[in-house]
Image: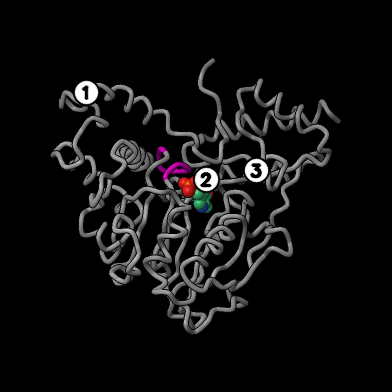
Amino acid sequence: MGRAFNFSAGPAVMPEAVLQQAASEMLDWHGSGMSVMEMSHRGKEFISIYEQAEADLRELLAVPAHFKILFMQGGGLAENAIVPLNLSQGGAMDFVLTGSWSQKSLKEAGKFGTARVAATAQADGFTTLPAPATWQIGADSRYVHICSNETIHGVEFHQLPDLKALGCDAPLVVDFSSHVASRPVDWSRVGLAFGGAQKNLGPAGLTLVIVREDLMGHALPHCPSAFDYKLVADNQSMYNTPPTYSIYIAGLVFQWLKKNGGIAAMEQRNIAKAQLLYDFLDSSSLFENRVAKDCRSRMNVPFFLRDESRNDAFLAGAKAANLLQLKGHKSVGGMRASIYNAMPIEGVQALVAYMREFEKTQA
Ligand SMILES: *Cc1c(COP(=O)(O)O)cnc(C)c1O
């Protein structure tokens, strides 16, 4: 069996060129006589890998100089605790609930301070985004949290909210785990953004944090040292041993992104891929997507068969056609196609062709 088209939500598809390069460098990285995973994180070889990865990411995402890029561990879920430990100062935080991931963030932050709901789209099953003008943000807010792409519900902010225009001086915290590097980021609207690597950047184990400098240095006294952004930043993400191999692979992904035209080109590809799939879903009498058109995710496309008794047949046929991991998240049901940067348009074309055929034969 050759490589399949893998629609997993995460860990997810990787660019094939990156896997090939990693394979060829596995035993001996650039004549060093070592695999990257055997290197000291303080040695000159790994430091060069780390510095290149950071510089490439800063260039790709156009991260301004007054933001620090941190390579951490713990995943998006650990950041749900690490962010309040660093930014809440024991005060109140406001959360916009747009799906499972922002709900989790709210719940965890409540352990470290007062976590409030500024707005929620729960009433319509998380198929819309509450308009920023309706958000209830306290004047004492330490930060406002959003998940800019809800991986499970398939809802995406196509524009980050402008909190200043809402009369709010609090920083915006963004969980961009599942669409980082799929589109440009307007850093003028962001205080801190975090994301696990395993959706769109590389292997699990690496967590990216990009934080405005003035927000560091205010951690609660009981914040673990390894999670104190200031300490991590002051030590170039090497206060403790960073996930070296994951950083190396993510660095190869950054080079692949640069070679393929950077984030602007990636965004155009992602728009084309998503449009292909959504256009088919909207024209189908068997399949449907229930998310409001103006906030549909370009990365995670949940969809349903109107006749759910055909779900198993759909998944079995997909597997036979080498289209893998299409089963929806158990909390939502149905199907989900995650079409991250590394999913080529050919994968989406093959999926749509299969769905078209399935619909015809089942009619
Ligand atoms: C996957 C995901 C997470 C959780 O990441 P872990 O690495 O499992 O902790 C958090 N937020 C979003 C939006 C995600 O997609």
Magenta highlight range: 197-203
Name which residue lies at 43% across and 66% down.
84
- The disc placed on residue 241 is none
Name which residue lies at 50% across and 43% down.
269
Quarter of the view holding residue 192: bottom left
Q: CA distance from mark 1 to mark 3?
A: 40 Å
- Give SS at disc 2: helix
Q: Could you tell whether 334 is left or right of 301 in the image?
A: right
In the rendering, at what x and y percent does residue 316 appear? 71, 24
In the rendering, at what x and y percent does residue 351 appear? 64, 32
- Give SS at disc 1: loop
Q: Is residue 35 above or below residue 168?
A: above
- The residue under label 3 is 329
Which mark lies nearer to you, 1 or 2? Answer: 1
- The residue under label 1 is 28
- The disc placed on residue 270 is 2
Name which residue lies at 64% across and 35% down.
326
Q: Is residue 162 above or below residue 12?
A: below
Q: Could you tell whether 359 is left or right of 190 in the image?
A: right
